[in-house]
Image (tube, rainbow, N blue to C red):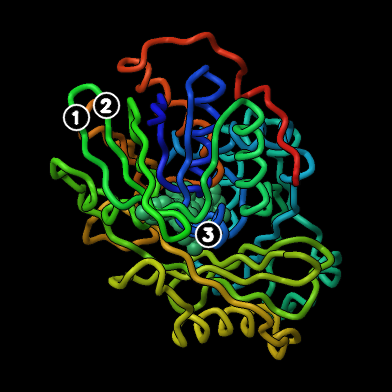
């Protein structure tokens, strides 16, 4: 039976990131994905490779710093997959975040981004605002323009897996973990593929199953502790219209949340929402109340586009630490939990910081796997679309 240094469950951005980082560090790797790459949250995000300007409001400074530096790195490593996009923040008489607050936030964002050209912002002259895709002019006081990254999340996931494969990692698709038993010196793994049961062994097992993280833990013996998390769904609508001037960062009139309006494959994408979710991850779908909420934001800021047809919609799940606070302001840090020296699970996290998360996890695995002859560095590996 094959024995791998690392077996990973889940082919989302975190699973493929770990596959790449572990292979680069010289370890033998197998990734099991029950469906196809990026079948879960990694194809249902807002597609932003960003510092997370809004996280400054909840004082997640180190997260923003980390994200901005990873954004810079991904712009270099994956120029065909990650691009800089102009974002516009309109301020009206009744906007809650006042111009001085936005200037302060954007200045801090620029500083955390090392005052790099891509981190700078400016206030647009109001005369230029007629060029902003039909943005409502009535009551408009100012518009700020800054830059952030955007990517095709699923394509980025596939590119990272391709990179891992080029370093020797193996990938099994439509391979669902059925059971894993953690022994003192290894993990025995059984998975199902094309109707038959297969098995392998690993020195370490990484649970990168995203919203299924708890379900995967339920299939592992001896029983493992699961940390308390909430699943929070976020939905997007793809509209049959085109945005020529860039992206928009709008304050939802009903609750002040940030909602993005973004160019997406020659159409426009509107999102996202935050609604607590209690069902099975595979059943998540856009709710009528989310559709109404997003279309209300569109009608408020872009009345001339409010009749655009919805040509696609999708919902994804965030994993957030359990608490009573508003979902919007909860910490977005990634948690790596090592419930056994041979078993690590990834909770939450961001597309933007997948590489850092993967490197941190692989660094921890060194304690059990020992150091091997490194074959590459992930911060130097170019990523190309397939
Ligand atoms: C609405 C929304 C918007 C977001 N926007 C952004 C953004 O703009 N920028 C950003 O940086 N981050 C964003 N994020 C966060 C980011 O998308 C997620 O953190 C990231 O995609 C999670 O990836 P993952 O690999 O952990 O999980 P997933 O992508 O969900 O992957 C888990 C995989 O595990 C597989 N799996 C499950 N069970 C098994 C099993 N038994 N056997 C084998 N395989 C299994 C699933 O099929 C799935 O492919 C957003 C998240 C959401 C929900």
Residue 183 numbered tag:
1
Between 196 and 65, the one lying in front of the other is: 196
- Apparent side of residue 314 relative to residue 158 in the rendered image (left or right): left
- Apparent side of residue 102 relative to residue 200 in the rendered image (left or right): right
Q: Earlier in the sequence, mark 3 or mark 1?
A: 3
* Distance of label 3 from label 1 (alpha carbons): 30 Å
Q: Which residue is mark 2?
A: 186
Which residue appears at 70% of the width and 56% of the height? 87
User: Are the residues flagged by discs 2 and 3 in contact, CB closer than 8 Å?
Assistant: no
Is label 3 within 8 A of ligand 1 (CB to nearest ligand atom)? Answer: yes
Which residue appears at 31% of the width and 35% of the height? 344
* Distance of label 2 from label 3 (alpha carbons): 29 Å
User: Are the residues flagged by discs 1 and 2 in contact, CB closer than 8 Å?
Assistant: yes
Is label 1 within 8 A of ligand 1 (CB to nearest ligand atom)? Answer: no
Q: Quadrant of residue 80?
A: top right
Between 331 and 176, the one lying in front of the other is: 176
* Distance of label 1 from label 2 (alpha carbons): 5 Å
Label 3: element kind = loop
Q: Quadrant of residue 44?
A: bottom right
Q: Percent position (x, y) of residue 222? A: 13, 40
Between 75 and 301, the one lying in front of the other is: 75
Residue 101 to residue 112: above or below: below
């Amino acid at each position: 039976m094959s024995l791998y240094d690392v077996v990973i469950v889940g082919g989302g951005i975190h699973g493929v990131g770990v596959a790449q980082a572990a292979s680069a560090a010289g370890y033998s790797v197998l990734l099991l994905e029950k469906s196809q790459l990026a079948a879960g949250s990694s194809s249902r995000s807002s597609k932003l490779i960003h510092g997370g300007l809004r996280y400054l409001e909840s004082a997640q400074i180190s997260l923003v710093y980390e994200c901005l530096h990873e954004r810079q790195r991904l712009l270099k490593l994956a120029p065909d997959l990650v691009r800089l996009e102009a974002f516009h923040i309109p301020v009206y008489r009744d906007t809650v975040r006042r111009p001085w607050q936005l200037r302060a936030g954007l200045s801090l964002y620029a500083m955390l981004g090392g005052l790099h050209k891509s981190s700078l912002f400016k206030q647009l002259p109001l005369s230029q605002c007629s060029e902003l895709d039909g943005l409502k002019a009535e009551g408009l006081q100012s518009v700020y323009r800054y830059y952030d990254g955007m990517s095709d999340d699923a394509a980025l996931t596939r590119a990272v897996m391709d990179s891992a494969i080029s370093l020797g990692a193996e990938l099994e698709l439509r391979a669902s973990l059925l059971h894993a038993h953690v022994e003192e010196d290894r993990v025995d793994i059984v998975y199902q593929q094309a109707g038959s049961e297969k098995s392998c062994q690993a020195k370490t097992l990484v649970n990168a199953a995203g919203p299924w993280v708890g379900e995967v833990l339920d299939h592992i013996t001896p029983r493992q502790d699961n940390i308390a998390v909430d699943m929070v769904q976020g939905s997007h609508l793809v509209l049959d219209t085109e945005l020529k001037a860039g992206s928009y960062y709008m304050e939802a009139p009903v609750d002040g949340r940030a909602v993005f309006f973004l160019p997406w494959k020659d159409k426009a994408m509107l999102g996202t929402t935050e609604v607590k979710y209690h069902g099975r991850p595979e059943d998540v779908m856009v709710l009528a109340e989310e559709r109404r909420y997003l279309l209300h934001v569109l009608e408020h800021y872009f009345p001339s586009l409010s009749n655009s047809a919805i040509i696609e919609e999708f919902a994804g799940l965030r994993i957030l630490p359990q608490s009573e606070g508003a979902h919007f302001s909860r910490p977005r840090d990634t948690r790596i939990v090592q419930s056994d020296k041979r078993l690590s699970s990834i909770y939450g996290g961001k597309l933007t910081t997948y590489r850092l998360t993967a490197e941190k996890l692989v660094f921890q695995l060194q304690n059990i796997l020992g150091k091997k002859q490194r074959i590459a560095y992930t911060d130097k590996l170019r990523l190309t679309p397939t």
